[in-house]
Amino acid sequence: MEPFKIHILGCGSALPTSRHNASSQVVELRDKMFMIDCGEGTQLQMRRSHIRFTKVGHIFISHLHGDHCFGLIGLISTFGLLGRTARLHIYATKELGPMLQAQLDLFCDRLGYEVEFHPIDTRQQQVIYEDRSLTVSTIPLEHRLPTCGFLFQEKPTAPHIRKEKIDFYRIPISQIGNIKAGADWTTEDGKVVPNHQLVYPAETLRSYAYCSDTRYMPDLGQRIRGVTALYHESTYADDNLLMAEKYFHSTARQAALVARDAQARQLILGHYSSRYEDENILLDEARQVFESTILADENMVVNL
Amino acid sequence: MEPFKIHILGCGSALPTSRHNASSQVVELRDKMFMIDCGEGTQLQMRRSHIRFTKVGHIFISHLHGDHCFGLIGLISTFGLLGRTARLHIYATKELGPMLQAQLDLFCDRLGYEVEFHPIDTRQQQVIYEDRSLTVSTIPLEHRLPTCGFLFQEKPTAPHIRKEKIDFYRIPISQIGNIKAGADWTTEDGKVVPNHQLVYPAETLRSYAYCSDTRYMPDLGQRIRGVTALYHESTYADDNLLMAEKYFHSTARQAALVARDAQARQLILGHYSSRYEDENILLDEARQVFESTILADENMVVNL
């Protein structure tokens, strides 16, 4: 299988601590890198995670709280100093557009590449990026200002040819494309060999949902049903449920309810409040609802 | 003596590395903290240096390159989250004013304190801040855009009363203020006791010059003559003299020439190019000209 990895660069919340950086992740799929959120210090975390700066072509910002976007201008600036020429695409709510342009004008004189801004509508679940390997869609969330998550979905790949069968039936190379596309094969004596005997099935399609920041949304699980891995914010444990409600955040138990409803294979917790010295209280709480839960941590890699 | 300390928070240059953070320092004098420059990640470095966020009331920005100011909005935002109410003063060239206001409008809704911006003229050597303990002056520098350093100078303190003499001559408490201010004492039998027998002299006045970023300025040493400690950028060693000249930076040898001309007590090198894995090449080069040189490093404290 092609690699489909999540690199955690930061999983703290608004107040930075020496344990956790501000939010940022990199999704790696088939040799491409996609960044989600870019809190202050993200470029340094990229270095620590040994992520090649040139590989990142698209950055998706969930919302305009500082701990999710203050690292953007530093990253853009550093890309320029490193001689980047490839266009960089940035997706965020429209308010970031003029700010980004003003920052580029003031701080990034003679940048050697273009930055293209794509305004997104956080109220719609829609595809905002697509290539031959995957789609990226918005996931409307409910926070104190317009916010969305992002759903990364693999596209179907061609099935794998069973070479021994091709040799056995002496199928010419010119027909391989048809067979990958699903065609059967008819031998010279008229026998039909069904397609499924000529190929191994393609891998199961994987997907990743990033949901931060949001208050608990009881219908969220349904909307991302079948997702392979879910990152869901768990700023608090249930001991601070009132704080979660007040500030439109979630508790670990609520994150687990979403994962359970989504029938996800794995839940990754993050966006921890700085008040938790030890996040195992969050982990234990979530696992009571959804066993397959892990704690995000800086420079951790999750393989899907 | 009252503490006069320099806390080094970051001493790297434009490209962040895992060894050095972007530029920032905190000058501590008599229970007050003054920040100089605020590159990305400064707020985290403050935590690592155990500097109390509430103590910092004034931030001086030398110039508007990102590695000297991209941490500002994150710091302002965090101060707000921590419940700050005291006004924060920011000094920088006028171009930062509108950018700062736009950032406050977009990212710092309902900030509980005021941010006051003070535009500075980097071409003049003039006092931009003064209280009863010290003055802060600009030091014009020569970089690729308007830039100045900052000179922190202690103000004279009162001399210390020699208690045994006061007791011996039975000088009433009401006269202590006069004696601290320099008055002699005349005894009942008309003998004049000169002031210097009644007091210990006040401490020598200390000063600190921060000079980054700049190309080598042969007259700089004269202008800060007698400074106690000098931080001077040494982005390169002499092996990259042409790079230094091209980008308006200095070499370690040039930094040492300035320290020698200033008759400084100590030179602190910093703003190292990421190309130097080991900065001892810079240290050795500087010490050939000016022996009392040290290398800045993150979370280091220099006592003046």
Image: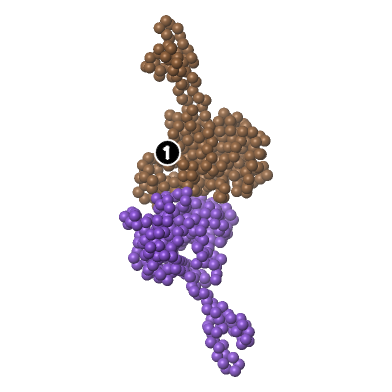
Chain colours: A purple, B brown
Q: Is residue B246 above or below residue A240?
A: above
Depth check: give the residue in front, B210 or B162: B162
**Where residue B43 appears, x then y in whole percent?**
46, 46
Q: Is residue A94 visible?
A: no
**Going 49% across and 16% down the picture, which residue do you hit?**
B196
Count every numbered label the image shows and give the total: 1
Q: Is residue B191 above or below residue A224?
A: above
Crowd around label 1: few <14 · some 14–19 · many ≥20 (10 Å): few
Give how far across and how far down residue B186 sits, in percent: 43, 9
Callout 1 amino acid: Lys
- Residue at point 44%, 54% (across, down): A12
Q: Residue furthest top?
A: B189
Residue on which disc 1 sits = B55
A19 with respect to A254 (left or right): right
Q: Is residue B160 visible?
A: yes
Is residue B188 placed above or below A247 in the rendered structure? Answer: above
Q: Is residue B107 left or right of residue B256?
A: left
In the rendered image, the vertical position of residue B288 relative to residue B105, given as above or below: above
Q: Position of residue B299 (x, y in %)?
A: 52, 42
Q: Residue furthest bottom?
A: A189
Q: Residue at x 64, y 37 (%)?
A: B286
Name the residue nearer the viewer: A282 or A96: A282
Q: Secondary structure at mark 1?
A: helix
Residue under the image location 53 percent in, 33 percent down: B303
| Chain of the residue displaying label 1 | B
